[in-house]
Image: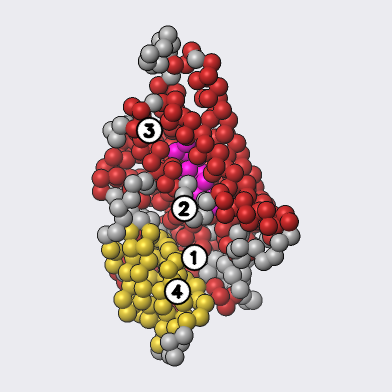
Amino acid sequence: MTAYVPGYNDKAEEELIGRARELRPLLLKSAPEADRNRRLSPEVFKALSDAGFWKMAAPRRWGGYGTSARAMTRVGLELGRGDGSVGWVYTVLHGTTWVASLGPDALQEAVFGSGGPEAVICGVFNPPGTLDEVEGGYIVNGKWPYASGCRHASWAQLGVEIRKKDGSRHPGGFAYLRASQFTVEDSWYMMGMKGTGSETVVAKDVFIPKGQFFNIAELGGIGKHSPGKKHVGEPSDYWQFMPFLRATAHGAVAGAALSILEFAKETCARPILYTTYTKKGDSANAQAQFGSAAAKIDGAIALALKNCQLIDEAGASRVPMTPTQRAQSKGEAALGVELICQAVDQLMHLAGSSAFDERKPIERFYRDLVFAARHTANLPYVGYEIYGKSLLGVSPNIAPDDLI
């Protein structure tokens, strides 16, 4: 295994983005089926796998691409333009793959040594399950809802607390279960992101060897590496947890916004009823509203890419982002989400009530976007408070550094 890999695999970036663009017709066509079945179709998931997208977050030491956070965000944006649910599942699964690549040597060998760089890992942190130590390993129990893409996964990365013999619980980390070791409970009935299949993973008295546990609490947080670790050295081994997950998720959300912009533009060729405008696009007010929405989406994408640059620079230099930089990235990401939400509301007003026809793609993109924007990691008022407290020197902040 390589001890150190400088830089990122920039050569692969444009090719992977091109593959994502080529999939857009398939994703648009398949999205209604995914909504009905509440999960991605086997055909779509195979297309994602064949395109090599699961290898993006896998380090080159295991045969992965070793791409940058910027590359992953841009691919997520293109997938999100075809189907918001696909962009979201891509984001979650490559995020959990990346977390696994930070794990101890034995874990990496179990996951990537057996499954290769195409290992597909779903993951949920909360609510944590329990981990009981037994001879040779651990017993895992728990139920984890919102496990996006879990029916397509070969592994599950599940947040657990360590339960002592007296019943007390202590901070732990992630238990890794193979697909044969968990079941899936049909629990995903939401109005948006229907196709993500974010169902509930269930583990009942499952034994895992010690090598399938990532004790994050013992290391002091995600991204910390123990002395003497063998499988480490990729720039991505030095990214910060939440900034990376946040920026890449915003790529998929921005992609959905770009599709809403595209479909709303088509409606500008129609008349504004009960007015003299035979084309909506002739209205100066409609022109201004459309331009305003487009600028807000562009601004949100620029903020996401700016935060990717901070992440990538930290990985390449091995110098972590400072608490101030993390808080700023959180605040700016909050602004990005707010800008996108404002933009798509403007666009849906322009598009008119017919845009809410369930048979039209714009309606699905809108549902997916406003739903994703309300994920707990995306709530603007939380991001603004964290950034404001940091700027004003208010301590402690409302979240620990690892979760900012």
Q: Which residue is mark 4?
A: 160
Asked whether the residues under the numbered discs 1 and 3 touch, taking CB atoms below 8 Å apart as contact, a structural biologist would say no
In primary-sequence order, the first of circles 1 and 4 is: 1
Q: Could you tell which of marks 3 and 2 lies nearer the N-terminus?
A: 3
- Residue bearing mark 1: 100
**Between residues 132 and 152, which one lies in front from this camera angle?**
132
- Give the SS element for disc 4: strand
Name the amino acid type tagged 2: His
Instruction: Provide the secondary structure element on which disc 1 rests.
Output: helix
Count up the numbered dots: 4
In the image, residue 353 above or below residue 390: above
- Which residue is at 49% across, 55% downward? 376
Pointer 1 local density, CA inside 10 Å: few below 14, some 14–19, many at least 20: many
Helix, strand or loop under label 2: loop
Q: Amino acid at mark 3?
A: Ile
- The x, y position of residue 96, in whole percent, is 47, 60
Q: Residue at x 61, y 73 (%)?
A: 220
The answer to whether the residues at label 2 and label 4 have Cβ atoms under 8 Å apart is no
